[in-house]
């Protein structure tokens, strides 16, 4: 095992029927990967070797030989068919993540990177979690937040969006949006953004069309969001915060900043989205290949690509590794 634990990132391979192992091996061979990173993979060694051989046979170059990689071997119990998830793939990805998390908690690695899992497969295996973020929160007994961060390849500007609510149905959003939750999420977003800027500019999206039009198209802005923002401003007078902004225009300045050749802009350093798709649609439209799912609130850094298992292309060896590279690089940066 590698001795310099500060550079070790433990990487769980995700659902074995998906593209996890493929994009991890591609990422580890990329010239864009931080060369200080020492990966420790948690998964099935035979599956890793099989994927390695298939990648070579498909003419893909610069794939590291698994014999040169630290691997914590937890073998698969059943033969896996690429693109088909079931209780066995769900059980494998759950066990791999559980082991990887414990390795970080035992300080045998400095941060955790997770490949995509299938929530359907987890449920088939009897693990009734909404996702990896929720499991990590339970394993560490911590309150977590889901943030997506990306660095523009055009100018180096960092784009951040945090979700107030995550994996819940739309009909339950109103009941989950509370004063305490919004304040906590704003505090989490501010704390993250302060790693890169002393006085970040924060923005919050409205819930309703046109941010409610002063109560004419929904009352949540008037009755909840604006009063919470006014209180939060009193506690953070040095921080510029804007909102609630109509959701259909909330990310326009971020898109302009992302695509600009200059990193000088008037875009917010962090945006609070009120529900999952409100935040993820602009994030993926603006920065699909570079965005990184980052879990805040844990006693360690955890990152993941911003995409899923891509079952439709699993086993075809044409998945892009860009977001996995970004996840690994950001885990290394944020854990310094």
Image: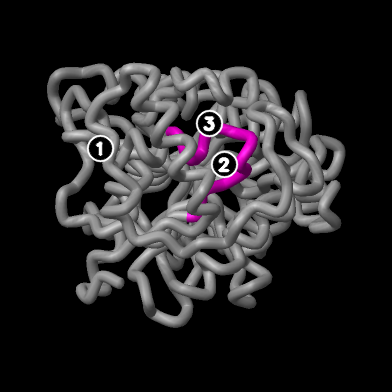
- Above or below residue 240? Residue 259 is above
- Disc 2 on helix, strand or loop? loop
- x, y (%) of residue 51? 46, 35
Q: Residue at x 36, y 71 (%)?
A: 109
**Based on the displayed image, in which of its 4 quarters is residue 121 positioned?**
top right
Q: Going by the image, does 146 lie left or right of 264?
A: right
Q: Which residue is mark 1?
A: 29
- The mark closer to the camera, 3 or 1, is 1
- The mark closer to the camera, 3 or 2, is 2
How far is mark 2 from mark 1, CA to CA? 19 Å
Q: Going by the image, does 68 lie left or right of 101?
A: left
Is there CB contact under 8 Å for labels 3 and 2?
no
Q: Is residue 243 visible?
A: no
* Residue 20 is covered by the magenta coloring: yes
Classify the position of the C terminus by image quarter: bottom left
How far is mark 3 from mark 2, CA to CA? 32 Å
Disc number placed over residue 245 in the picture, else none: 3
Q: Residue at x 34, y 30 (%)?
A: 322
Is there CB contact under 8 Å for labels 2 and 1?
no
How far is mark 3 from mark 1, CA to CA? 42 Å
Exactly how many numbered labels are in the figure?
3
Q: Going by the image, does 103 lie left or right of 61?
A: right
Label whose residue precedes the other's in the sequence (3 or 1) = 1
The segment highlighted magenta reads 12-22
Label whose residue precedes the other's in the sequence (3 or 2) = 2
* Residue 299 is covered by the magenta coloring: no
The one nearer the camera, 247 or 101, is 101
Disc number placed over residue 116 in the picture, else none: 2
- The mark closer to the camera, 2 or 1, is 1
- Above or below residue 70? Residue 162 is above
- Above or below residue 50? Residue 185 is below
């Amino acid at each position: 095992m590698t001795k310099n634990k500060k550079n070790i990132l433990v990487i769980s391979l995700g659902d074995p029927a998906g593209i996890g192992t493929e994009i991890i091996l591609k990422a580890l061979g990329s010239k864009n990967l931080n060369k200080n990173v020492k990966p420790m993979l948690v998964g099935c060694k035979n599956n890793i070797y099989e994927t390695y051989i298939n990648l070579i046979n498909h003419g893909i170059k610069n794939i590291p030989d698994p014999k040169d990689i630290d691997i914590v071997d937890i073998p698969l119990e059943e033969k896996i068919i690429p693109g088909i998830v079931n209780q066995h793939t769900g059980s494998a990805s759950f066990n791999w993540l559980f082991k990887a998390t414990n390795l970080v908690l035992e300080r045998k690695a400095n941060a955790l990177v997770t490949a995509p899992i299938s929530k359907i497969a987890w449920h088939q295996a009897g693990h009734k979690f909404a996702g990896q973020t929720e499991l990590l929160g339970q394993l560490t007994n911590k309150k977590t937040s889901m943030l997506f961060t990306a660095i523009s390849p055009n100018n180096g500007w960092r784009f951040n969006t945090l979700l107030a609510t995550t994996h819940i149905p739309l009909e339950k959003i109103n009941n989950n949006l509370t004063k305490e939750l919004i304040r906590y999420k704003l505090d989490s977003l501010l704390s993250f953004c302060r790693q890169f800027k002393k006085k970040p500019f924060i923005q919050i999206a409205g819930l309703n069309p046109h941010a409610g039009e002063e109560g004419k198209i929904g009352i949540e802005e008037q009755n909840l969001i604006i009063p919470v923002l006014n209180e939060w401003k009193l506690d953070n007078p040095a921080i510029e915060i804007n909102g609630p902004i109509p959701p259909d225009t909330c990310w326009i300045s971020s898109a302009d900043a992302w695509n600009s050749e200059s990193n000088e802009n008037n875009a917010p350093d962090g945006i609070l989205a009120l529900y999952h798709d409100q935040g993820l649609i602009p994030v993926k439209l603006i920065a699909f290949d570079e965005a990184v799912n980052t879990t805040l609130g844990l006693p360690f850094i955890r990152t993941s690509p911003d995409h899923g298992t891509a079952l439709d292309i699993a086993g075809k060896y044409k998945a892009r590794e860009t977001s996995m590279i970004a996840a690994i690089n950001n885990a290394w940066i944020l854990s310094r």
